Image: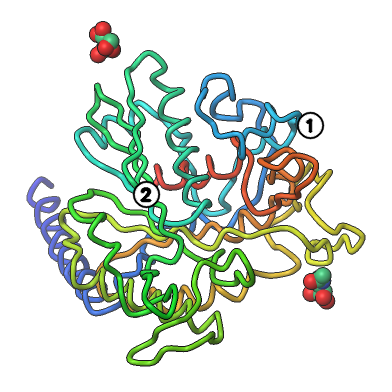
Amino acid sequence: MGVRVQCCSSFFFFFFFLFLGLASKVRGNGSGWDSKQCDWFTGTWVVDESYPLYQPDTCPFIEREFRCQGNGRPDLIYTHYRWHPLACNLLRFDGVDFLEKMRGKSIMFVGDSLSRNQWQSLTCLLHSAVPNSNYTLVRVGDVSIFTFTEYRVKVMLDRNVYLVDVVKENIGRVLKLDSIEGSKLWQGIDMLIFNTWHWWSRRGPTQPWDYIQLGGQILKDMDRMKAFEEALKTWGAWVDTNVDPKKVKVFFQGISPSHYNGSLWNEPSAKSCIRQKTPVPGSVYPGGPPAAVAVLKSVLSTIKKPVTLLDITMLSLLRKDGHPSIYGLTGASGMDCSHWCLPGVPDTWNEILYNLI
Ligand SMILES: *[C@@H]1O[C@H](CO)[C@@H](O)[C@H](O)[C@H]1NC(C)=O
Ligand SMILES: *[C@@H]1O[C@H](CO)[C@@H](O)[C@H](O)[C@H]1NC(C)=O
């Protein structure tokens, strides 16, 4: 009997390792884009009274822009939703475990205000888990550094809205789709989480460039989706040239959606997200994902080094109730259906990030 077991288990192990070998070959040849994970991104929102993961008063540094309750938002049901993936079991965020896993390491979000939204969420999630542990928050140029001193964990934000460079030249400010000097700030970081999208459609006075450079050509403007794609390719080439996957984990925070058109969630009378109190039920957003998602996925599939897409678009599309609306930075004179209240949806992005590391 004992002999038989031995025979069969070594037989089993032979095939097991053969399988592992084949699997790693397939991965090695294929794209680095992480598809081996379980699908965390298809699911539905369920009410769970044990959420939110922290209370606003346990996170004193939430910026006014995201501090919806503090700005007078009266309804709170939106804070009690938990993301429920259909095919996997999402572990509840554990801040102490996260800090232990990252002890001595650095995390950097790179991108626009949606990166700031996720960065703030992560600092709140961690601080509320260890409220008596010392922290420091400093800003050096475009980089904000939140340090959990006891754990020597740095959670940083590099504000860089296009990932590629905008350079002041004699003709004006030039958005250089092939130039990525800003990447100097990303060297030596253990975990990088990139994002860019919302600024690509800017026009008029808030557009922060006058010309676009692509190759040797200087252009007054070009198709914005194409420009976005070119910049992503430049970023992808940077990843392939500079990232050592043994040392650095790279994520891309997917496209974070806005809610300014109720037709897209079968409520044509809604012209914004105001007074939206509950998510879209089910797992599918009637209006479908924004076109930028397909462009992003296509560029990610060409990158050879491992990059994990935090594919948060669909789960966030369902959350028409998660934005500040008039309870954001500008109050009643504005309407913010792009950023997210905290506590809120970005906590789920970080909860998924926690499950991925
Ligand atoms: C936190 O900082 C204070 C003041 O610098 C210091 O007295 C205290 O020992 C620190 N606590 C820990 C746990 O490091
Ligand atoms: C809202 O979405 C609908 C459906 O896609 C579209 O026909 C309409 O033009 C959009 N409205 C605005 C103001 O963009």
Estimate the x, y position of residue 190 in percent, counting from the top left. Answer: 23, 48
Instruction: Return the residue found at the far right.
Output: 269
Helix, strand, or loop for circle 2?
A: loop
Nearest the camera: 7 or 208?
A: 208
Mark 1 crowdedness (10 Å alpha carbons): few <14, some 14-19, many ≥20: few
Estimate the x, y position of residue 343 in percent, counting from the top left. Answer: 59, 34
Q: Nearer the viewer, mark 2 or mark 1?
A: 2
- Looking at the image, tell me whether mark 2 or mark 1 is earlier in sequence order: 1
Instruction: Return the residue found at the far left.
Output: 3
Estimate the x, y position of residue 226 in percent, counting from the top left. Answer: 50, 84
Instruction: Return the residue found at the far front.
Output: 170
Chosen colour scheme? rainbow
237 above or below 104?
Answer: below
Q: Which residue is mark 1?
A: 75
Question: Does the numbered disc 1 mark a residue whose Cβ is under 8 Å from ligand 2?
Answer: no
* Residue type marked 2: Asp
- In-image side of 21 versus 323 (left or right): left
Instruction: Return the residue found at the far bottom.
Output: 217
Helix, strand, or loop for circle 1?
A: loop
Q: Quadrant of ligand 1?
A: top left
Residue 142's disc number: 2
